[in-house]
Image (tube, coloured by chain):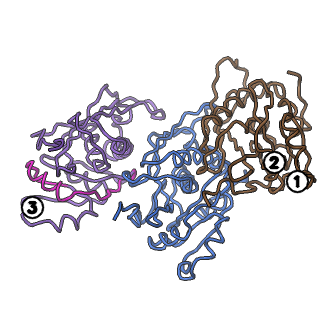
Chain colours: A blue, B brown, C purple
């Protein structure tokens, strides 16, 4: 009966730096969807000017055009966001980055992984894993607004099934979440984000964030 | 009941530098449409010659070919316009720019965002938000002529619904506006533009503009 | 009756450095599938910084998009893995690499050669053949997770038919393997891998592997 899509519940028990758990929504139901990022070169901290753009971003994982655009929006935003956390961290500016979304045979598309991708890039650049057992979903605008997404019910169920204990959803999806059965919502810490700042404070609670 | 297109009325309460509210027109009616721009690198003010073109423009947001062309027309025009405002501002010349139009899953096309895009690029380069609560629509020629667009009625209604208090329309759409019901037009400041200079004076009333 | 696919059982009696035997699965049944890699330039060990990415990867063999993506995922992973084995080996960072999958007239696709490609690249960079008579299959994530693949039965039969004495399969395919007839499984050493580390220890038993 058709092709199993996103059947894997939990690829990572513990996510290393650069890897963040997102939530996807398909005709088959919801699913966790990991964003993996890696650095292909070493980035030196030197005193040279940053006028030229030296880095690059390679994307794999059978992504459609909208999701590919999401990765570029996320990278532009993550670069400016990183300067508020670690001013001299040039990883995203100069790094040759590789972003992959397992599993390679499954086509994926849509803008709802925006927050997840930014989080993965920041985790990679900071060389620090995000808070354990958190998953998220949300489209991101170029200036860091978090936009609502579809499939909240399916995504929340998928998160629970995968043993996720804390989720971050777009503020504008709050009614969708509130309408869910109590049984689905219990034992789940939930945060609503209207800007990416809200997401960051959940996944990196100990990192000081300068004003924009 | 089809796909909801441009259902969001107001993404920004206050637009930061680089973001400008445009007006779009779809089969579903009118809508606000934000143009977001961001700088991917730091631009230094140095004394080197400007002969070589160092900058770049990346565009995302599921835009069709005509709208993509609009962004390049707007950038070329914005570069020459900027030199009339701040002669030593090289942001558009040297900057690696990123322009995004939320929401990523909605396809967008057409030339009518020309004025909006130029305004967003100038706001970014000047690092100054445009006048609060202004929205605009209008195709732009490469020399700064403002050309008429469709859907004036739907766009004006969308602007009112989103709480916009001042709109800029192409001069040649004046009759379309005049024909609207008084009820739609009341409490709305309107300006008609035949060249981009007219637009600029509305959104940056305090900035001195040198003759071309 | 149809197109012969992967009809050759055994292309190499002994695989040289840079060549590894994988297992493929087609509508015609299973087959061995060799990954061949070669270096197009000499790589010098010098003291220069590694900030810029100098190398390249050329891919031939009539590969589909998913399999092409697999080669890039494998290269990114192999680069970081190699630094755990030989810190000063810049072959994958600076080398102009060529990867080919015989036979050129046969279209090939899918993500299941991930482990095989990493193994071939590492064997090339280390200039050392892998353990004799080993074949493998398994998708790889960007961080080295080994993901399950299809066609385990057909692949194991193909390995036996080609005289392979040891195979490496994804951990999550263990039940598929356990369900096979005893006759198929006899005289076959099998290893299950959940991360690429497990694969490496089988094919390079004598090489010391630093922690990540």
Q: Is residue A28 above or below residue B204?
A: below
| Residue holding disc 2 | B153
Pinpoint residue C63: horizontal percent, then vertical percent. 30, 39
B135 displayed left or right of C184: right
Do tags 3 and 1 sit on the same chain?
no
The residue drawn where x is 66% and y is 62% is A198
Q: Residue furthest bottom?
A: A183
| Residue holding disc 3 | C184
Q: SS of the residue at dot 3?
A: helix
Give the label on residue B184, or none: 1
Q: Which residues are magenta?
A: C142-167
The image shows a total of numbered marks equal to 3
Q: Is residue A153 above or below residue A117?
A: below
Circle 3 or circle 2, nearest the eye? 2
Pinpoint residue C130: horizontal percent, then vertical percent. 19, 44
CA distance separating discs 2 and 1: 9 Å
């Amino acid at each position: 009966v058709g092709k199993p899509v996103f059947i894997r519940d939990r690829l990572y028990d513990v996510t290393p730096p650069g890897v963040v758990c997102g939530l996807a929504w398909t005709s088959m139901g919801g699913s966790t969807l990991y964003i993996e990022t890696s650095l292909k070169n070493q980035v030196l901290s030197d005193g040279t000017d940053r006028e030229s753009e030296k880095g690059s971003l390679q994307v794999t994982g059978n992504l459609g055009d909208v999701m590919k655009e999401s990765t570029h929006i996320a990278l532009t935003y993550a670069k400016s966001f990183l300067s508020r956390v670690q001013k001299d961290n040039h990883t995203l500016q100069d790094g040759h980055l590789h972003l992959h979304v397992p599993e390679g045979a499954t086509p994926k598309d849509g803008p709802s992984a925006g927050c997840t991708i930014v989080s993965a890039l920041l985790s990679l650049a900071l060389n620090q894993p995000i808070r354990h057992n958190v998953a998220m979903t949300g489209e991101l605008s170029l200036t860091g607004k978090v936009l609502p997404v579809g499939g909240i019910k399916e995504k929340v169920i998928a998160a629970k099934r995968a043993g996720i204990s804390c989720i971050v959803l777009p503020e504008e999806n709050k009614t969708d979440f509130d309408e869910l059965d109590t049984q689905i919502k219990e034992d789940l810490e939930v945060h609503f984000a209207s800007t990416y700042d809200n997401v960051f404070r959940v996944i990196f609670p100990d990192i000081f964030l300068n004003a924009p």
